[in-house]
Amino acid sequence: MKISRIAAISSALAVLVLTASLPVHAQVAGGTLSGTVSDKSGAVIAGVQISIKNVATGLVRNIDTDTAGFYTAPNLLPGNYEISVSARGFATQVQTGITLEVGAQQVLNITMRVGQVAETVVVTAEAPEVQLATSSIGAVVNSTTVRELPLNGRSWTDLATLQPGVGAVQTQASYATGGLRGNRGFGNQISVAGARPQQNNYRLDGISINDYANGGPGSVIGGNLGVDAIQEFSVLTSNPSAEYGRTSGGVVNAITRSGTNQFHGGTYEFLRNSALDARNFFDASRIPAFKRNQFGVLAGGPIRKDKTFIFGDYEGIRQSKGITYVDTVPSLAARMGNLSTGTVTVDPAAAKYLGFYPLPNGPLIGNGDRAIFTFAGQQVVNENFFTLRADHRISEKDSLFGTYEFDDTSFTSPDKLDNVLLGSRTKRQIAVLEEDHIFSPSLVNSLRFGFNRDRVDNDQGVKAINPLAADPSLAAVPGKFAPTWPYPAFRSSPEV
């Protein structure tokens, strides 16, 4: 089965206009900081100059309060911020320790005291934990949790289950069992507040990245790499606001990591090996070989300080895993037509298909017409994943960022009777481009273009292991290896 899907050009040419005179909804790709500025008596102060500085990048957003003393700064990159507030007749106030999370609608009310503008008051505090501007229920998985918690396979979407009301679907088929998993989507399947996995919406930098089955994003082996490329993500479990759309379940809202004014980078490798594995009950005297190398490199920093930044991440998986297959095949006597119910003549036209059943190498079972065949097949996975993000401040009023993500994964393994080498492959591409323009301190416009494309080759024949499988005259489907999956079950009956 081949599947190719170009997802809706998410948020294409979507213009989101935000005004400071009204309460606003956060841009999905970032967070919003808003509040009221007043004096100690509670009277609001109009025309206050507010400077919001991202500590990591040095980028500054300048806004003024309106006649009601209200300010709002939408679509800010998650991170640590420093806020400077100044007005005539009041001391300049600098507030540090403000942390803004992805998708947050954070309210920060500021109280100023009378004094000279040249006088500076430094306040170290955190924004309130309770988000007063939204009724959505959710939580954030921050950058420390994403990168530091141990993950088998390093799939960041697995961390969504840390939130209340989110559970993994434990009954989903493994990618190694054939086409059933691919038919439902290879990505991680979770239930949010009891909803079906296909009811959730996954977003990256503001665009939907659901797969071809409208499930969670993921490669053919079920993981969604990019732990080091994700800044943080939130999980909205109930009552998401209208701008998220496309969902009757939960929302997993992630944002990619950007470069900062400081160069940073790293390399890593994780190794798993069968030398430390225990023997499976069905394994022969030798444990099937298993080796997984998961490695990567990441780097980020400024191209121009306080102006242009870049971040890149590459991750690869090379895995070879031995699997012991246990199958039931006709016994040697049954292949000759000598069944427990009597002797039958095997039709020559049917006899050639018996070659698709390997000779038994295990004990007889039941009435002796069947026997056990075991073999150690090798499952091979090769995955290449990378993310690239660039941020650029065009001017004080214009900023631009772009993200490109690419994932190519192939998986091969023999079928249950070691006749055909089967393969599946996923190839995913995601691109985001966003431009923000500040028309005035009370009017901000965000323009976002998104592209999400999945190509899947699911459970395809790669090559014939048994020479009979390459015989086109034995194929049930023209152009395919013979026989087609699933194999007919072997039964002890005179009609064989």
Image: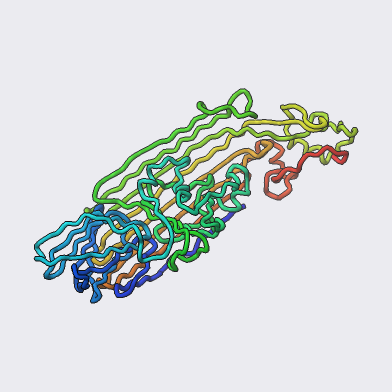
Identify the residue at image location x=81%, y=39%.
Answer: 491
The outermost residue toward the bottom is 67
Q: Is residue 455 above or below residue 420?
A: below
Q: Is residue 96 above or below residue 152?
A: below
Report x, y in % for residue 117: 11, 65
The outermost residue toward the front is 41
Q: Look at the image and tell me whether residue 423 can be seen.
A: yes
Report x, y in % for residue 168: 53, 49
Identify the residue at image location x=26%, y=71%.
Answer: 70
Q: Is residue 325 above or below residue 195?
A: above
Q: How is the image coloured?
A: rainbow
Identify the residue at image location x=19%, y=70%.
Answer: 41
Q: Quadrant of residue 487?
A: top right
Q: Quadrant of residue 197?
A: bottom right
Residue 59 shown left or right of residue 320 in the figure: left
Residue 330 shown left or right of residue 194 in the figure: right
Q: Quadrant of residue 413?
A: top right
Q: Nearer the viewer, residue 109 or 318?
A: 109
Report x, y in % for residue 314: 39, 44
Q: Look at the image and tell me whether residue 4 can be seen.
A: no
Q: How many marks?
A: 0
Q: Nearer the viewer, residue 143 or 124?
A: 124
Q: Nearer the viewer, residue 280 or 33?
A: 33
Q: Nearer the viewer, residue 408 or 233?
A: 233
Report x, y in % for residue 468: 72, 38
Q: Is residue 323 above or below residue 423?
A: above
Which image quadrant: the C terminus?
Answer: top right
